[in-house]
Image (cartoon, grey):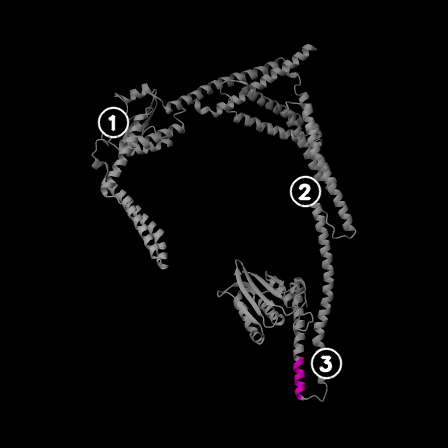
Amino acid sequence: MDIRWKNKYFNIIVLIIAIYMAALSILTASDIISHRKYLSNSAYFNSEQFKRELNEYYYSMLRPLLVTYKDYDKREDITKVTINEVNAASAQYQQLITSRLAELDTQYNQLIYQAQASNDKLKADSLTEEKNKKIDEAKKYYGKTPEEVRQLLLGYFTKDYENIKKAVDNRKSIKYYIKNEKTGEIYTNLNNVTNINSYIKKNALYSLKFPDDSKGDGSLAGITSLSISDSFNGYLIIPKSVEGYSQTHENYNYYNSIKTRVIKEVILLVVSIIACVTILLYLKKTNRLSYNFVSKPLFILRKIPIELRLGSFILSVLLAAYFINNTTNFFYFPIGLRHFVILTQLTAIFIYILICAWDFYLLIKKKEELKQQWYKSIIYSFKIIFSGTTAYKLILLKVLIFIIINFIFGGIMMLMLEHDIPTGFILSIISYVLTVLPYIIRKITLFSDILRGTDEIVSGNLDYVIDTKQKGYLGKLTNNINNMKQGFKKSLEGQIRSERLKSELITNVSHDLKTPLTSIINYVDLLKREELSKEEMQDYVEILARKTERLKVLIEDLFEASKLSSGEVELNLEKIDVGALLNQSLAEFEEKIIGSTLTFKVDAPKQKIYANLDGKKTWRVFENLINNTLKYSQPNTRVYIDLSQNENKIILTVKNISAYELDFDVDEIFERFKRGDKSRNTEGSGLGLAIAKSIVELQGGKLNIIIDGDLFKAIVEFNA
């Protein structure tokens, strides 16, 4: 028995060592792959860092010294600065003077002018003096004679030459040997070198022959181009050793140190792979792998729902990849506990990945077990839950989320408390009491409030409001109940109002039709009398004509309102000038306007305002609005008509002071046969605004009424 237990633990330990070796192999392989470029003997000299260094040296130091400042020490001062350079610099100084003078003009001229305009001579003189002083300073500073410019340039060139020469002389890490093919001159910082090829062979770490060697390297193509244009042929050389400090050699040594480390890693990789494979082969050969190492972990693992296992497997793979790609300092010395911790973490992740992979492999092979795992899954459980009562779905889901969070919290607590399971369990229970329990109590309370509120509403109390500030589906349900109650209440009020309006409509139609009809009947009776004079008969006939015309207008308006409300109207849309149509409408009422005591104030833009409208129907809208103001405005007041265009809207506003008390709801004014004159003594059908609103809305516009005390404002909006 003891031997069996010893064999079991021995097998487990040996297998874990094999997994350690596998983890080490993967870490090593990853680091080798990421640093494989350092294995080249010329890794540093092939790097972009070194190529930038060479380009900077050639462009900024060597070429200016050999071309721009060639034989600079031997030249006379007069030849060091050309006349073209003097002229160019002088022109720049002249531009600076001109720019400064223009700047001073901008700064002072307006101020001087304002001072002169306000007769402040003292201030004007002071500003003029200040301006002239600054002009003199600018001319003195920038006004250089050609000789002064030449001396300035000479000083600049000499200083630049000395800096470049000093930089080249101090750069011991780079040697150059260049021949000018045109003149045959040799330029070099090498001492006593007669055979450059022999020197390179014996003393060079690296050499660049240009233009030949740099042609195939895009990073060094600039050196090739310049050397050809300068007729240069030569070498840039990195010697094996230099006197003093050299950053180039430091970088070279650093690259070589990485190369040495990577070579050691290659050896470590081979050793770890051999060790891992040897252990596995040994275990297989001795039949020690026959023991089911994963049976117990697998039994525990299958207690977890399958989707959580799949998710944790994916996360483990991602975590392993992160470890492998981001453990960049693993192979740095000194070796210590940190290396063991990292390797142990990665090994633990690998063990979990292997167990999960084996689990999925077994499930795929045994379909019945996979089906059983599906029945135990969270998704299937939610499917069962969601097939039940809808009211409890979200609550159950949130409770489950809270429980999972608390389990995770408990696990974190156990890890933080060094696997102190009792303490972690207690903290998890406390967390449950502080989060899940209050949540359930809040939901039960909300259910109680909803139930009490629905009882009140069912009993007829439509003013009862279920008070809740909670969010989520239960809060939404509460808001929906409140909104349904408000909608029902509004619908009921609308129905009552509709019944009232129907009653008023019948009364108003009867009154408005009966009044002219009664007059017609009475005057027809009067005309039947034989003793009437010719003048009286003529008066009666005229009255009959007016009453008949009024009856005709009432019937026509009634038919038009009916057609408009049903939508059975054909619109003849065309591009019309709204301003011209408004002026035409006002012209039609000119006689009535002049005959009234009202003053019309019209504000319309001079430019044309176009819109796609039915001209005849839109004219009817304007006619009804103007006619309303003539009938219902307080005498001796003003009527304001404003036409404007705002972005993509054309807005017409008509404002007047009502002669009658406006003590009705704004919506009621659009009802058929509704009139501001409640006594209904004024002429009109009461359909004007209803017809106007229907016409406007059929053309995609809006007609709104605003009442403020006795101020009546009609606002018409059309799309431009």
Find out whether residue 537 is within the magenta segment.
Answer: yes
Give the quarter of the figure containing the C terminus.
bottom right
Mark 2 near mark 3, Cβ–Cβ under 8 Å? no
Query: What residue type is disc 1 on?
Result: Ile
Mark 2 near mark 1, Cβ–Cβ under 8 Å? no
Disc 2: CA contacts within 10 A as few (<14), some (14-19) or many (>=20): few
- Residue 101, percent across and down? 31, 49
Question: Which residue corresponds to mark 2?
Answer: 472
Find out whether residue 154 is within the magenta segment.
Answer: no
Disc 3: CA contacts within 10 A as few (<14), some (14-19) or many (>=20): few
- Residue 513, percent across and down? 70, 73
Does label 3 or label 1 sit earlier along the sequence?
A: 1
Foreground mark, 3 or 1, reads 3
Give the quarter of the figure containing the N terminus.
top right
Q: Specify the label residue 186 is tagged with.
A: 1
Q: Which of the pair 601/55 is nearer the observer?
A: 601
Q: Which residues are magenta?
A: 534-544
Mark 3 near mark 1, Cβ–Cβ under 8 Å? no
Does label 2 or label 3 sit earlier along the sequence?
A: 2
Does label 2 or label 1 sit earlier along the sequence?
A: 1
Disc 2, SS: helix
Q: CA distance from mark 3 to mark 1?
A: 134 Å
Q: Specify the label residue 33 is tagged with.
A: none
Disc 1: CA contacts within 10 A as few (<14), some (14-19) or many (>=20): few
Q: Is residue 330 found left or right of 664 in the rendered image?
A: left
Q: Is residue 720 above or below residue 483?
A: below
Disc 3, SS: helix
Q: Is residue 327 found left or right of 505 in the rendered image?
A: left
Question: Which residue corresponds to mark 3?
Answer: 522
Q: CA distance from mark 2 to mark 1?
A: 86 Å
Q: Is residue 390 above or below residue 459?
A: above
